[in-house]
Image: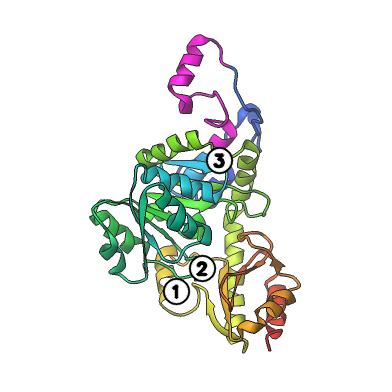
Amino acid sequence: MGEEHDLATRLVHGAGPHPLGAVGTPVFDTAAFVLDDHVAHTRAVADPAGTLFYTRLQNPTVASLEKVLADADSAPRALAFASGMAAISTTLLALLRGGGHVVASDQLFIATRDLLEHDLPAFGATVTFADFRAPAALPAALRPDTRAVFFETFTNPGLDVLDVPALVAAAHERGVPVVVDNTFASPVLVRPIELGADLVVQSATKYLSGHGRAVAGAVAGGEELVARVAALRRTLGSTISPHTAAAIIDGMRTLPLRMTRASASAQRLAQVAVAHPAVAHVAYPGLPGPNRERAMRLTGGAGFGGMLSIRLREPARKAAVYDAFALIVRATSLGDTASLVDWIDEPDVLRISVGIEDPTDLETDLESALNAAL
């Protein structure tokens, strides 16, 4: 669909038109596609990404999802993957093929941190972690052989909001491409490509899917860099399945509605937690302070997301609080329609992903759980 339509409209209608006038996205549940003759086979072998040949290489359902993903992130091209980590690892391996240096934020999802700290060096890359909240940290860490800069828009689990345009400018001044993980914010709140980033990655398992039923990842960006990632995806076989692709398309149709609701409820829960005597600190981009100011610039006031982290005054009471939740579900994911609480690997921190339940019910459950720490 054209850019004259709002994002919410494009997410509903952007995957079509479909064969036979189907309203929902058809699932092409097949491993391979018929080739008419030897000429067609030769053409498929020469250009496997441009011919319906084998689902690991191309599939119409996956292509429909990638069309929606690219449009949502204002990118020329997008790729769908079997998981968020498949998207991140394939992207970084493509940029660091044969070695090279990457500068990464020191606040990252634990699996991403493990990839950068342990796995990429085993493939010949070198990694520098830096505190991207400090303006001078990124320029100081860049080297002549730096091939990528990697960070999260809203950090996991600390919920610090990074200055995306400033970080992009610092990297581009040295000719280094920027990869941004936008999982916590989603395209509804922040579109890093519009802020100058070269590639945006997401765990589509989370807000894009929105219903906790599918595991997937996404990469979007300019044609040249995405083509490099696509070439490696073909070899690694980390492509999303057609069934999962259709589920992500369906989830993205309600993404703006869910994100708006989750943001509003998370703001309320953050304020409840701030006022509770058992809480030492609440990390949420919508609370007063520098993070809120940066978030306002990034999102234009569209919201502050559905994620918050709560630091308890008494670490010994963390298990009691965790066990006391009755409505908010104890689970490790995020971005679901149901609110989830996660046991973060810090002695006094719990992370909450706010869903779309009645906000008053959520407030009651949070306050009751926090009372277990008193």
Q: What is the distance, in whole Å, between disc 3 and disc 2 at their CAs?
A: 26 Å
Q: What is the distance, in whole Å, between disc 2 and disc 1 at their CAs?
A: 8 Å
Q: Residues within 10 Å of mark 1 (few under 14, many from 20)?
A: some
Q: Is residue 55 magenta?
A: yes
Q: Amino acid at mark 3?
A: Leu
Report the side of 315 relative to 189 (left or right).
right
Q: What is the distance, in whole Å, between disc 1 and disc 3 at their CAs?
A: 32 Å
Residue matched to label 3:
65
Measuring from the top left, give residue 230's x and y in whole percent: 45, 37
Tell me the residue at 60%/52% (across/down): 205
Q: Secondary structure at mark 1?
A: helix
Mark identifier at residue 292: 1
| Depth order, front residue of 324/368 | 324
Mark identifier at residue 304: 2
Tell me the residue at 70%/85% (across/down): 371
**Residue range corresponding to the magenta coloring:** 35-63
Tell me the residue at 67%/72% (across/down): 359
Measuring from the top left, give residue 199's x and y in whole percent: 40, 49
Q: Residues within 10 Å of mark 3 (few under 14, many from 20)?
A: many
- 289 is higher (above) or lower (below) than 296: below
Say if mark 2 contacts mark 1, CB within 8 Å.
yes
